[in-house]
Image (cartoon, rainbow, N blue to C red):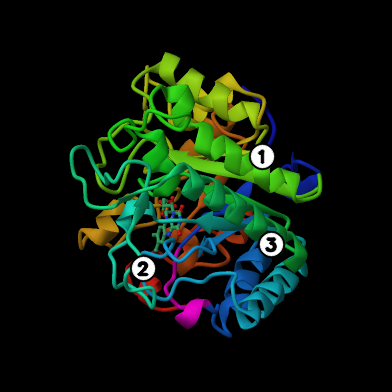
Amino acid sequence: MTNKSLFSPFYINNHELKNRFVMAPMTRNFAPNGIPSDYASEYYAKRAKGGVSLILTEGVEVSHPSSSGYPDVPNLISSESKKMWAQVVKEVHKYESKIFCQLWHVGGIRKPGIDKHKDVPGYTPSGLVRANKKVAYEMTLDDIQEMISIYAEDAKICEELGFDGVEIHGAHGYLIDQFFWSDTNIRSDKYGGSLEKRTQFARDIIQACQNVTTEDFSVGIRFSQWKQQDYDAKLALNKNELKIFVDCLSESKPDFFHTSMRRFWEPEINNSTLAALVKGMTEIPVIGVGSVGLDKDFIRLYAGDDKTKVSDIDHLFDSFRAEEFDLIAIGRALLSDPDWVKKLEQNKIDTIIPFDKSFVENYI
Ligand SMILES: Cc1cc2nc3c(=O)[nH]c(=O)nc-3n(C[C@H](O)[C@H](O)[C@H](O)COP(=O)(O)O)c2cc1C
């Protein structure tokens, strides 16, 4: 047990974070033609002003025609888009918060025809989106090398725009997770086969991003057990597998791990949460996430059961004292109440605005 507070500072790389609260990455679909809306800088600045020490942006498509899977998701391609992101960064920095851009490729979730690249298929390690379901394009070794370079070029652009780092989206069944997952990666080259080899793509991406950015720029990765194609899927079936996974990724020296959980308290293996397990295996900072301050997990949002109540958060403090994570990300609770962190710090929990679906549909 530690006596440190969730309101104590923490370092990722050389970045001092004023507390342990992070804004989780949340796609908003408000970026027609890949350009963040005029409102984006105010939207992020409100959360920085409201007390989060680090913002992880919504997923931003990497600059390859196959990366997109959903409408109106931002990218880093056009000068207008870059200009808007630079503005977002500038506004967030005014409140002494840091901001990392989440780099996203949806892999086989892409349906051809979704955007202007009508004929571009979903890119995947083995053409599979789930076990035995061959519906997408199997990447060649050249495709893989090209994709790694594109991640690196985008990380470089992010540094030039003023971002403090990038989070590589390796979670939820998208491209990088499709490489991690044995059901969707049946390659027999250096990017497939054993668990170690299935982490190679992510390791190469992390290293390539580090190679083209300065030491002060953070490069971390988000991963999850669950996949959006299969909520019961597992990246690692037991502690031993998880240790292999974490050790392999650690070789590329990411600046943080973001363990995506649906409920931050729910045990994953041997009565421990994914965040706590990973934290016990490495010195690399660990971000936890999942239903903080809410009585329902975010999958319920998409199942039509979206109205939440503000829940007791004593448990969050207990988990932090038990050293189950270093930082905690807040998702939906920050969509409905940008001042969530400040209200918690000032002990005004009864004034927190509870989340419901209208806060996803609207951009406040
Ligand atoms: C509207 C919405 C959009 C999301 N978009 C992303 C995303 O772009 N990238 C990502 O890694 N996770 C995304 N997530 C998952 C969140 O980052 C977070 O892990 C999840 O909402 C659980 O946190 P919460 O219970 O505090 O909301 C999204 C969640 C929501 C509700």
Q: Is residue 305 left or right of residue 200?
A: left
User: Which quadrant of the view contains residue 255?
Assistant: top right
Give the dominant element type of the magenta stretch: helix, strand or loop. Answer: loop
* Quarter of the rendered structure image containing ligand 1: bottom left
Vertical order, 76 against 320 (above or below): below
Vertical order, 116 against 194 (above or below): below
Image coordinates for residue 199, horizontal then vertical, percent: 49, 31
Q: Toward the viewer: 131 or 220?
A: 131
Residue 29 covered by magenta stretch: yes
Q: Is residue 308 visible?
A: yes
Marks 2 and 1: which is nearer the front? 1
Mark sitting earlier along the chain (2/3): 2
Three-letter residue code for mark 1: Gln
Q: Toward the viewer: 28 or 122?
A: 122
Q: Are marks 3 and 1 in contact (CB under 8 Å)?
A: no
Tag 3 residue: 158
Q: Toward the viewer: 66 or 195?
A: 66
Tag 1 residue: 207
Residues under labels 2 and 3: Cα distance?
Answer: 22 Å
Part of the protein shown in magenta: 27-34
Tag 2 residue: 70
Label 2 Cα neighbours within 10 Å, binned few <14 / some 14-19 / many ≥20: some
Q: Is residue 287 visible?
A: no
Instruction: Indicate if the residue with disc 3 has its beta carbon within 8 Å of ligand 1.
Output: no
**Residue sitting at 45 percent across and 68 percent down?**
336
**Residue sitting at 28 percent across and 64 percent down?**
111
Residues under labels 2 and 1: Cα distance?
Answer: 28 Å
Label 1 Cα neighbours within 10 Å, binned few <14 / some 14-19 / many ≥20: some
- SS for tag 1? helix
